[in-house]
Amino acid sequence: MPDTVVTVTGHVCTDVVYRVTPSGAGLCSFRLASTPRRFDRASESWVDGPTSFYTVTCWRGLGENVAASVSKGQPVLVTGKLRVREWTTPEGRSGVSVELDATGVGHDLSRGTSRFSKVSRSSGAETEPGDPHSEAEQDARAGGAFGGSAGADPVHVEPAVPGAMLAAG
């Protein structure tokens, strides 16, 4: 079955947690709250719909960049593979968890500004060629889409200084 890839906008509603797995791969996770808004013509006001919550997981370089760039309360866009899992505790309690295995995370620039900074990492053999999470694959995709060169350093987003403006040049 093919993967279901979605993009979700929302706010980071938990602390961003970064850890390294026993195999040495970096892993970052957080919860994302997404609340749709619509204009109610009857009351002539904006109303919130029901909030959906997602567990977001970011691997390797993406995880490192997200942990260094994103914090609780910030508006973000997350693109990734959607996973819906049913669970049951030994006590008999059950539920459903909705997870996103992120392939991209960024600040929602309709809500504020950000500044990109390149990150330099040593090449490692923690990912295989063709792995969509590998830095080389991410760099190759970025180079093809945006005119960069393959092998360039990956980038991460840093919050900008409030009120900062870009100079025209």
Image (spheres, rainbow, N blue to C red):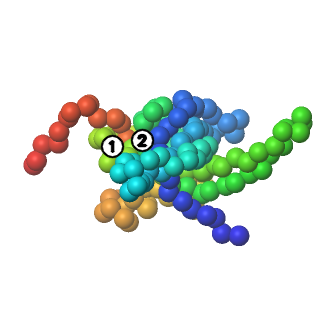
In the rendered image, the quadrant that contains the N terminus is bottom right
Judging depth in this view, the residue of 110 and 56 nearest the camera is: 110
| Residue farthest left in this picture | 169
Q: Amino acid at mark 2?
A: Pro
Judging depth in this view, the residue of 167 and 60 nearest the camera is: 167
User: Is residue 81 placed above or below 33 in the rendered structure?
Assistant: below
Judging depth in this view, the residue of 121 and 165 nearest the camera is: 165
User: Is residue 5 placed above or below 69 in the rendered structure?
Assistant: below
Q: Which residue bears the numbered disc 2?
A: 75
- Asked where in the image residue 38 lies, by quadrant, the reply is bottom left
User: Is residue 166 placed above or below 150 in the rendered structure?
Assistant: above
User: Is residue 109 placed above or below 29 in the rendered structure?
Assistant: below
Q: Mark 2 Cα within 10 Å, few/some/many (few <14, many 20+)?
A: many
Q: Amino acid at mark 1?
A: Arg
Viewed as shown, does residue 160 lie left or right of 154?
Answer: left
Image position, residue 158 (x, y; %): 35, 36
Q: Mark 1 Cα within 10 Å, few/some/many (few <14, many 20+)?
A: few
Q: Residue at x 33, y 43 (%)?
A: 111
> Is the residue under label 2 in contact with that under label 1 (CB below 8 Å)?
yes
Q: Residue at x 32, y 48 (%)?
A: 110
Q: Which residue bears the numbered disc 1?
A: 111
